[in-house]
Amino acid sequence: MALSSPDPKRPTLGLTELIAMTSALMALNALSIDIMLPALPDIGEAFGAAGNERQLVITAYVFGFGIAQIFYGPLADALGRRTVLLVSLGAYSLATLLCLAAPEFGWMLAARALQGAAAAGTRVIATAVVRDLVSGRRMAQIISIAMTFFMAAPILAPGLGQLILFVADWRWIFAALLTGGGLLWAWMLLRLPETLSAENRIPVRIGSAARNYWLAASNRITLGYMLAAGFIFGGLFAFIATAEQVMAELYGLEAWFALAFAGIAGGLAISNIINARIVQRHGMRRISHAAIIAFTLINVGHTLYAMAGEPPFWVFYPLLTLGMMLFGMMGANFSALVLEPAGKRAGTTSALYGSVTAIGGAILGSAIGQSFNGSVVPLLAGMAGLGAVALVIVLITEKGRLFGTGDTGPETGEA
């Protein structure tokens, strides 16, 4: 299936390549986060960052990633998707070089934040390009399929990081990221069309940018699901920040940690495959509402169990995996529900959504991660509380009515 674009040099883009590009752009961010996990103890030792401080290598990247999306949105809506994406990928490579050259821990955190800020353009443009070309449940389906393939990054990334550490030091992990970013830049340069036509571009003005963000946030559905997603992402980032300490240290998995993490990421990929298959029949609301209720209940029960005594790994791991699979049922559908009313402001709306979920998720996830005390209770209680708050927000957004079918039906043409 070929999708038409307004780019005279690249008038069509195959659906398969669109999914591949979206997956690769999303995967760069997942790779930049998850490949670092096995190296956190070595990085902490190299810079004298003990205990929970080493988590900041993860949260600094996510925080920079969140803040920068606010700026990429208006730029993508004014200058077009392709130009902004190429600049952001180039900046990512430069920031990765700064990470390699960091002389102390503070500089490393600053370079990681810059790396995240540069990569933020990939998040904004990936979803905006999809929204430019398709809409409705077809958009949700494509995003879900892309997320399925992008989940290969967290499945493989910790193992890749561990393999690098077997033969070299942690700096070679950044060298691998530098190579990946360069290859992705070359692919986008050669193949990505401009998907935003000239007549739909919005000039960059502070006043107009603020107005567009206000118009995006003033939509009840966009605002509600964006805030709910921010709390849910807080649980995800809390898990990522503490995963190495919980599984590698607390449960003694050590080098087997990468395999355990891959299993959880694989569960997320499976849930996205399931979502892609059922979303056109059941709709975004029914699936995501059922998932958020189940996510909250499972984590509440898991927390109560852990408070009575540290759960054995054979109990902790399956319950945690199930909770993360339910997150997969929420992520793509919440994103699609946020973007559905966006129209030509898809870039701005995508930027606002990405910024709110990344900044909110980083702050909430870091707060939970920094409370790690050698027990799984802070992590589980944090995820349960965040799930409950997100459920309340969804209830308010939907005026107390869950499992509705008001989302758009199947779409196969252009947006």
Image (tube, helix red, strand yellow):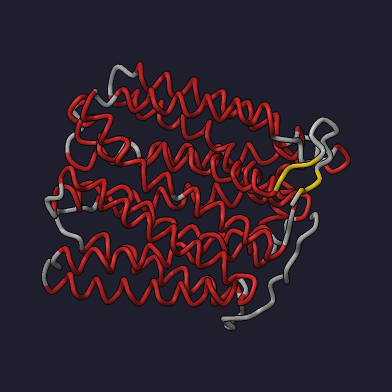
Which quadrant of the rendered structure holds the C terminus? bottom right
* Residue 183 x %, y %: 53, 26
Q: Which residue is drawn at 15% across and 50% down?
A: 253
Q: Which residue is drawn at 15% across and 45% down?
A: 254
Q: In this picture, is 27 found above or below 97? A: below
* Residue 157 x %, y %: 36, 41
* Residue 391 x %, y %: 47, 73
Q: In this picture, is 397 found above or below 71? A: below
Q: Can residue 218 be seen in this view?
A: no
Q: Residue at x 31, y 41 (%)?
A: 158
The residue lying toward the viewer, choosing from 141 and 349, is 141
Which residue is farthest bottom?
A: 401
The residue lying toward the viewer, choosing from 174 and 413, is 413
Q: In this picture, is 395 found above or below 248? A: below
Q: Which quarter of the figure has residue 268?
A: bottom left
Q: Which quarter of the figure has residue 255?
A: top left
Is 161 left, or right, of 31 in this rendering?
Answer: left
Which residue is farthest right?
A: 199
Q: Can residue 32 be seen in this view?
A: yes
